Amino acid sequence: MASEPATVRCPLCGGDSAPAGTKRGYEVRACGDCGFWFVHPFPSAQALNERYSDNYRGSTATFYPKLRSRRRRAFVKSIRFWRHVAGRRVLDIGCGGGIMVDAFRRVGADAHGMDISANSIAFARNRFPRATFYCEDFGAMARRDLVFDFMFTAEVMEHLAGPHDCLRMIDALSRPGTVIYVSTPDIGHPAVPETTLDWSEICPPEHLQWFNRANMTRLFDGYGFDLLKAFAKRKAALSLLFKKRQG
C-alpha cells in the first residue's frame, strides 16, 4: 500500500502547502492559508554562499556594473527616505556594492551595509570608505551589539531560503520606533499572469520565495512591526514601510 506523501508546511505561517508546479527543475509550492509561494526544498546555506559570495553579477573589488546610473537612481531614492535617515544609524541589508549606503550617507545618515558577496563588499569598502560595511550572514550580523534606526532591503527577500533568518536579524538589530523599508516582487498583484508559473519573477534558483502584501505584513507583525505605509505600484512589486512597536 502506497504511503501518503509527507506534508510540507509553509515556512512563513506553518500552514499546509500544495505543489504549484515545476520551474527550471525546482518544485514550487503554494500555501493555501497565507498565499506564500516557495521552492521546495530550499537550497542549502552552502549553495547560496557559493552563488553569491564571489563575483556575483560580475562585481569585483574594483568594478561594479552600471555604477554611474545606479548611483544616480540611489541618490534620488535616498531623498524619498530623508526624514527617516538624516542623522540616524541606517543599515542596507543586501547592500551589494554599497551604492545605496553611500546615498544614505550623502543625505546625512550614519550609513552601514551588509552582504555575503565578498567582492561586492570589497568594492564598497574601496569606493565608499566613509561608510561601514560587513561581509557576513544574518546570524553573524544579529550577534553584533548594534541597533539601527532605519533598515532598508530592496530586491533581497525573494533570493533567500526562507523568510525567518532575515527577520530574526532585523528584530535583533531594532528597537521600538525602528523603521524598515522592504521591496520585493508581489505575487498577489493583478499584473501577475493568470498562470502564475509563467510570471518572469518565478525564476529559481535566482528567486526562491514570493510574498504578497498580506503575508508580508503577517510576517513582520510576528516580529513586532506594524505596517506604516504601502506604496502603490503598477508593476507586480511590494513596496512597504514598517515600524517596530513599543513594548
Image (cartoon, rainbow, N blue to C red):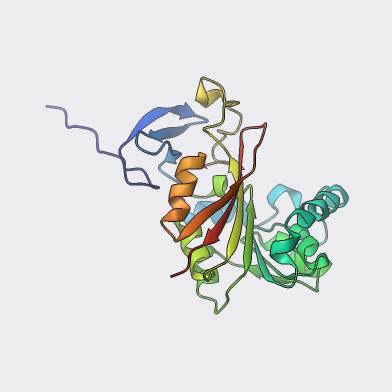
Question: Residue at horizontal 39%, vertical 39%?
Answer: 34
**Which quadrant of the structure image shows residue 204?**
top right
The image position of residue 89, as x and y in percent, is 67, 72
Question: Residue at horizontal 49%, vertical 58%?
Answer: 225
Count of picture labels: 0
Question: Residue at horizontal 79%, vertical 53%?
Answer: 74
Residue closest to the far left: 1
Q: Can residue 154 be seen here?
A: yes
Residue closest to the far bottom: 145
In the drawing, does residue 89 fall left or right of residue 9? Answer: right
Q: Is residue 72 above or below residue 143?
A: above
The image position of residue 243, as x and y in percent, is 55, 60
**Position of the N terminus by quadrant:** top left
The image position of residue 53, as x and y in percent, is 63, 58
In the drawing, does residue 73 fall left or right of residue 219? Answer: right
**Position of the C terminus by quadrant:** bottom left
Residue closest to the far top: 194
Residue closest to the far right: 68
**Residue nearest the observer in this picture, 209 or 83:** 83
Q: Can residue 121 be seen here?
A: no
**Which quadrant of the structure image shows residue 230?**
top right
Question: Residue at horizontal 44%, vertical 33%?
Answer: 28
Q: Is residue 139 above or below residue 44?
A: below
In the drawing, does residue 161 fall left or right of residue 117? Answer: left
Q: Is residue 75 above or below residue 1?
A: below
**Residue nearest the observer in this picture, 40 or 130:** 130
**Residue nearest the observer in this picture, 167 or 77:** 77
